[in-house]
Amino acid sequence: MSWQRAIWARKLKSDGKMAHRGEASTALDARGVTVPWPRRRALSRALLSACLAHLVLPSAAAAQEKLRIVTTLPTYASIAREIAGDLAEVEAIARGDEDPHFVTPRPSYAALIKKADLFVATGLDLELWAPTLLDRAGNSKVMDGAPGYVAAYAGIELLDIPAVISRSEGDVHVFGNPHVHTDPVNAIIIGQNILAGLRRIDMDRSATYEANARAFADRLLRRLCGERLVEIFGSETLFELARTRRLWGFLEENSYQGKPLTDYVGGWLAEGAPFRDREMACYHKNWIYFSARFRVPCAMYVEPKVGIPPSPGHVRELIDWMAENEIPALFAANYFSRSQIENVASRTGAEALIVPHSVDGAEGVDDYFDLVDLWVSRLAEAFAGQAGRRD
């Protein structure tokens, strides 16, 4: 008997717990309680099973690792984070203050896509650099048509589809205007497309993604239309009315509890009242979906033909029109020439509203809600300020 075992034997004997000859051998459990050897063997088997279970845990955990989502634009990344929650790591290729038409396809971007489980792009002819990156990445999971590829535009009614396709008209988008994210209702559809992609590649956690998508849509509709309309009609009904562009007509033609439904409008639509049904000037045709949703058309552009610099004659015509019609705002994305925008605005009395076109395009614009908040508030201030000056 070793000296350690002798010590334990003396301890057991002194406690009156030493086993007599012929009795079952004993040992102590973790609490210091005597355990017969048969039970000890059972405990050992249980411990072994627990250890083996622990050994297989890594493979089970691997199946639940965070997905990797790569998007072309930061706005799509913001929406993807809303849908995936903490089940995915999301990265965007373009910067928020970068012209999405002209992103250099760097090797580091291809490396991101190579490791992606899901890739989100507009799906039209906006990011003409994306196919090059997909080819370089060689990731079959996210190639166009694969389960891990998401076309953000799917299901969105495209506007500004050209009747004539000619180089003389500039860099025409042959399928329609691709800047779909500027309408909050389209953002819900983009979220649904991302949800569909996540279901395809990670069905086991689809219930979580679906709940996140519903919560995102509900939050957006409450922010767009106001809490009261959502309480009256529900998110699904409001979404369908807005998606089919029947919302304003329905609200103007109907009443509730003796009041016109338009009296219940809140959120961004209410905040946009100062510029509703007013005209503004814009630099580029990248606000058409915002204009349609908020009823504030871009009546003239600094860049009349996409990708073709304006002629001096056109600039003079624009300045004269803005001054004559007292246009209060020149709306432009912050990746265009600031000096040119400010020069035109200063000669007309309009305010140069130079804003980010995408999430992360300016300090404090951290998600999609921040982005639309900024657009609406800046325009409302400019139009309200003009009305104040008139008074």
Image (spheres, rainbow, N blue to C red):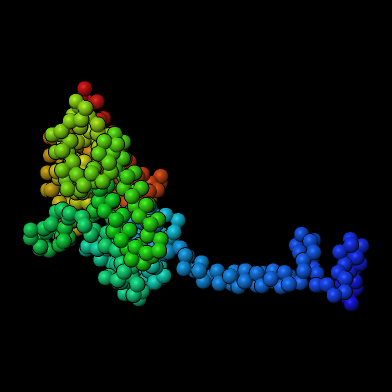
Asked which quadrant contains residue 147, the reply is bottom left
Asked which quadrant contains residue 238, the reply is top left
Residue nearest the viewer, comparing 344 with 20: 20
204 sits left or right of 149 in the view = right
Residue furthest toward the top?
391
| Vertical relation: 93 (above or below) 268 | below
Residue nearest the viewer, comparing 376 with 57: 57
Asked which quadrant contains residue 293, the reply is top left
- Check the picture and name the quadrant holding the N terminus: bottom right
The picture places residue 275, in percent across and down from the top left corner, at 21, 35
**Residue located 40% across and 48% down the image:** 366
**Residue located 33% across and 58% down the image:** 195
Residue nearest the viewer, comparing 65 with 103: 65
The picture places residue 79, in percent across and down from the top left corner, at 35, 53
Residue nearest the viewer, comparing 237 with 126: 237
Residue furthest toward the left?
164
Tell me if residue 78 can be seen: no
- Check the picture and name the quadrant holding the C terminus: top left
| Vertical relation: 81 (above or below) 20 | above
| Vertical relation: 20 (above or below) 312 | below
355 sits left or right of 344 in the view = right
| Vertical relation: 162 (above or below) 288 | below
The picture places residue 54, in percent across and down from the top left corner, at 59, 69
Say how many tags the image has: 0
Tell me if residue 49 can be seen: yes
**Residue located 11% across and 58% down the image:** 162
**Residue located 76% across and 72% down the image:** 37
The picture places residue 103, in percent across and down from the top left corner, at 31, 63
